Image: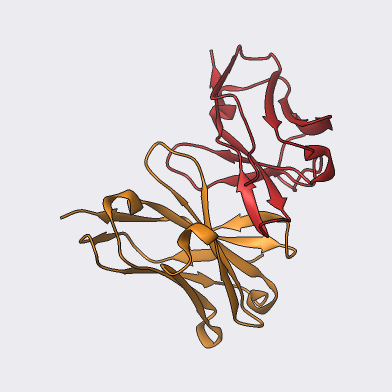
Amino acid sequence: SYVLTQPPSVSVAPGKAASITCGGNNIGGSSVHWYQQRPGQAPLLVIYYDDDRPSGTPERFSGSKSGDTATLTISRVEAGDEADYYCQVWDSSSDQPVFGGGTTLTVL
Amino acid sequence: QVQLLQSGAEVKKPGSSVTVSCQASGDTFSTYTIGWVRQAPGQGLEWLGRLIPITAIAISAQKFQGRVTITADKSTHTVYMELSSLSSDDTAVYYCAGLSGATGYFDIWGQGTLVTVSS
């Protein structure tokens, strides 16, 4: 089955940029979506189709892909950005979504 | 904008079944595919299956085939997810989510339903 690999944790100082990676075999051929999940809340879509932002997602959030890695970048990180972040693709071979293991973003 | 409202928390015995409901507001119920995702305590997101309300076709994840049943009541705009043969490993928060496109992303989520399996 298809596997997406994320680092368990990323730490960043306020005002700096944070990058969260999502690795997968031939991920360049898939659309990657990103979710933010704050403690006790449901996931919230923050990036879809690699680099599109839903209305309501701050412009500080951006997505990109290169090779076998997709990246969520949060510029000028704020304390309110502390959360778990999950990447997701649709695996056509199994016809189901696949989620990365999640990355906890800590704002120092 | 469609909103998803889930049923309340449940406590179940091992070996029993649980049914979680997800009611969609708005008038786009028939065009949205509704998926089910669960999250065990301290763990990541796990896919259970989906249902296309307009066709009532339900597809469960291979891991849960035979244990998950997803149905819909069009008259009340409600999707149901039944999980049978419960064990302590099924203790989790269960989310319904609206799938944009047949194989896309989840742009709306229910608030989650905690299911606790304990003897």
Residue appearing at x 75%, y 48% in the figure: A55
Q: Considering the image in quadrants, where does the N terminus of chain B appear?
A: bottom right
Is B10 rendered above or below residue A52?
below
Q: Which chain is orange?
A: B
**Quadrant hosting residue A52:** top right
The percent position of residue A59, horizontal first and vertical second, equals: 78, 33
**Quadrant hosting residue B103:** bottom right
The percent position of residue A64, horizontal first and vertical second, equals: 81, 32
Observer-nearest residue: B92 or A106?
B92
Q: Considering the image in quadrants, where does the C terminus of chain B appear?
A: bottom left
Is B88 rendered above or below residue A16?
below
Name the residue at the left extreme: B119
**Quadrant hosting residue A74:** top right
The percent position of residue A15, horizontal first and vertical second, equals: 67, 14
In this picture, residue B117 sits left or right of residue B76: left
Name the residue at the bottom extreme: B75
Is B79 rendered above or below residue A83?
below
The percent position of residue B46, horizontal first and vertical second, equals: 51, 49
In this picture, residue B111 sits left or right of residue A53: left
Whether residue B96 can be seen here? no
Observer-nearest residue: B1 or B101?
B101
In this picture, residue A49 sits left or right of residue A33: right
Residue appearing at x 82%, y 32% in the figure: A65
Observer-nearest residue: B117 or B10?
B117
Is B33 rendered above or below residue A19?
below
Observer-nearest residue: A81 or B80?
B80
Q: What is the total number of numbered labels drawn onto the structure image?
A: 0
Q: Which chain is red?
A: A
Describe the colour scheme in one phrase: by chain
Whether residue A46 can be seen here? yes
